[in-house]
Each structure stands twice: as C-alpha cells, then as structure tokens.
Amino acid sequence: MPRTTIAITSKAEANVSCTQRCQKKTPPDCRHKPIRAAAFIGCILVIVALCGGAFGVYAGPDQGVTTANTIPPAPVPVDPQLTQATTGPSEVLVGAYLYFVRDIDTRANTFVGDFYLWFLWRGDRDPTKSFEIMNAVGAPTIKPIFTDDADVGKPEELPDGRLYQQFHIQGTFGCSMDFSTYPLDRHVLTIELEDTKSTVRDILYKVDEPSTTLHPDVKAQGWERHGFSGRALTVDYASTFGDPREQGTIQYAHVSFGLEIERPRPSAILEGLAPIVISMIIGLCALFLRPDEFGTRMAMYATIVMTYVFVNMDIASKVPDGAGTLLRKITVTGFIILAMLSLAGIRSFALAKQERFDEARRFDRICFGVALTAFFTACVTVIGLNY
C-alpha cells in the first residue's frame, strides 16, 4: 500500500507539472484566442458556402435535359425520308392515356402501370392484331374496348373511313434506370410498343400527340412527376431472325411512351448528401481539440465511419448492386479524407507527447485547411462531372 500511494502521488505530481509547463507555453497564444475564434467561424461560413455551391450545381437550370413533357431522344429516330423511300406503308396513329402509376421499384427497375392505348388506321392491315408491349414483365392484362357479340375485339369504323380501336392495359413494366446521379436522379418510366410482324415497309407509327397525356390525379409516390409523352421511331435489330426472305437487317415500327419522374431535391439532400457533409464537418472540427486528446478524436472518426456505412446500406436497398452512384463516389472521398485525418491525429499526438504543443497546433490547422479544400473540391468535381 505505501508503494501504491507513492506511485499515485508521483503520477499526480507529474500531471500537475505537465499542466504547468503547458500553461507556461500557452499564455502567448491566449492573446490570439479572438483571432482563432474568428478564423473558426470563418471556416464554418466557408463550409456552408461550399455546400451551397455544390448543391447549386444541380439545383441550377438544367443543361441538356429534356423538358417536362418529353422523354429522352430515341436511339434510332424515325428517318424523315422513310415515307419517300418506301412504297406505301400504312400510317397508324397511336396514342396513350396514363391512368395511374404505382410500386416504382428502383432496385428492380420496374413499375406498375394502368393506361389506355388506341389505334387509328386505314386499310385492311389491322395493327391491333400484331402489336406487342416489349417491356412488359410477365403477361399484362389487355382488354379491348370495342368488341363484337362474342366479346372479341372489333374495331369501330369512323365516318371518315378510318378504323379505331382502344385497349385498357394493366401490368408491370421494366425500364432502364440510370443511377449515376443518385440521390439527385431522374428517370423515365417507359412503355415500349412495337409491331412484331409488319416491318416499316408495311406499317409506320405516328404519335397522337394532342391526345397523349396522363390523368390529372396520377401520383408517383416518393417522386415528383413531370410530363407524359410519346415518340415514334424505328428499331433496327441488325438481324433477319433467320427469315430467308429478308435481305440485310429488319426494321420495325416502334413507339415509346414515357413518364418523367424526379426524386424530390429537399429529401434527396437531407437523406443522402447531408449526413455525409455534416459528418465530415464534425471530423474537421476534431482538429480543434487539444493535440493530446487522441482518444476523443479517434472516437469521433469511428462514429463518422459508422455513419458512412449506414448511408451505403441505405444506397444498397434502393439501387441495383454495383450501380455507380454520385453518393457512393462522395462517400469514398469521405473515407479517404477520414484516413488522412486519422494519420494526422497520430502525428499531432506524437508531437504533443514530445511537448511540442505549438507545432502540433500548427500542424492541425494545416491539416484542417488541406482536408476541407480536398473534400469540397472533390464533391463539386464529382457533381459537376455528372451534370
């Protein structure tokens, strides 16, 4: 017991002596406390300004993005000379009325849709007998509106001699979604229609633009909806599908109807980007702790790492595996900066153990500036490259 008491007393005296030495070194710095406080506040304002600039890159006017009532350009647009180069293809007017959309599954790239589809044409070639919904997942329900006594589809003949048929269609549809800008992403929910028998030599589609629209009460839960429109095009499959009667490739008439949706920006920023940015700000502020408080710094960094892990788990639940997203790129940048801060904390602690407190503080301030600049420069660069 006496030996233990002496050891404790010695340790207490050593702490007091260390504190006195620190106090002897720190009085000259006390005169600069107001300056340091002003510098700290200035750094926080710079962080806020950079955050606003990073988010403003996306929030600004869209460049090169389709308007609210259009869908992205088709890969193979209709050739304007096609009607002159071919001999008498039948022109079929196609329109759609979107009634509702639900169950938008971004991970599976599918959605459930309910819409009305109609055809207007002339002649004996009936396009309603050979159309197919190319992106249907499973067998959609297709119910003809105009039928005969046996409930079999029969088109109506209009006074001008054209034939008219309408269908009520329900089903699940797949579409290709691009998550490179997640969580600031936007997509087009498409319904792809194509004639499976007649080539462009026989049938050409034309969109009934004045009547193609969506129900006013259509809501895409969790998304902001924009316009619904259609685009006629031709599809070249670069194959004859084994038909010896065909020479070269076969082209088919195709119509793509699409509803443009966008993830709400406030929720996207608060749920996706804000945790990453705020965690990094906390990590940077750890550099203002005493150099010898190594354990506190490492505890803060460990908490930030767990935050990033949870953010990535949330990403994995919403996008397909392996999808390269904007948020993942920013998270990787954050992990790199945290690794740098951890190494800086070790160096600062080593200087403090050698009682080189002024040098340790200067080193921390330099690390703060470098890490702050590197993180927000990387964020702005990543966002800028995706828009």
Image: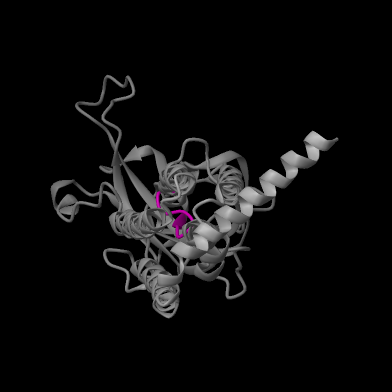
Residue 90 shows up from this direction: yes
Image side of residue 303 versus residue 203, left or right: right
The residue positioned 62% from the left and 56% from the top of the image is: 16
Which of the 4 quarters of the picture holds residue 17?
bottom right
The residue positioned 47% from the left and 57% from the top of the image is: 287
Q: Quadrant of the N terminus?
A: top right
Q: Nearer the viewer, residue 289 or 249?
A: 289
The residue positioned 23% from the left and 49% from the top of the image is: 88
Q: Nearer the viewer, residue 93 or 353?
A: 353
**Residue 99 colored in magenta in the image:** no
Residue 171 shows up from this direction: no
Q: Position of residue 146 (x, y in %)?
A: 60, 58
The residue positioned 27% from the left and 19% from the top of the image is: 244
Q: Position of residue 228 (x, y in %)?
A: 46, 66
Name, please, the residue furthest toward the right. Answer: 1
Image side of residue 283 versus residue 201, left or right: right
**Residue 182 colored in magenta in the image:** yes
The magenta segment is 179-188
Q: Position of residue 61 (x, y in %)?
A: 32, 74
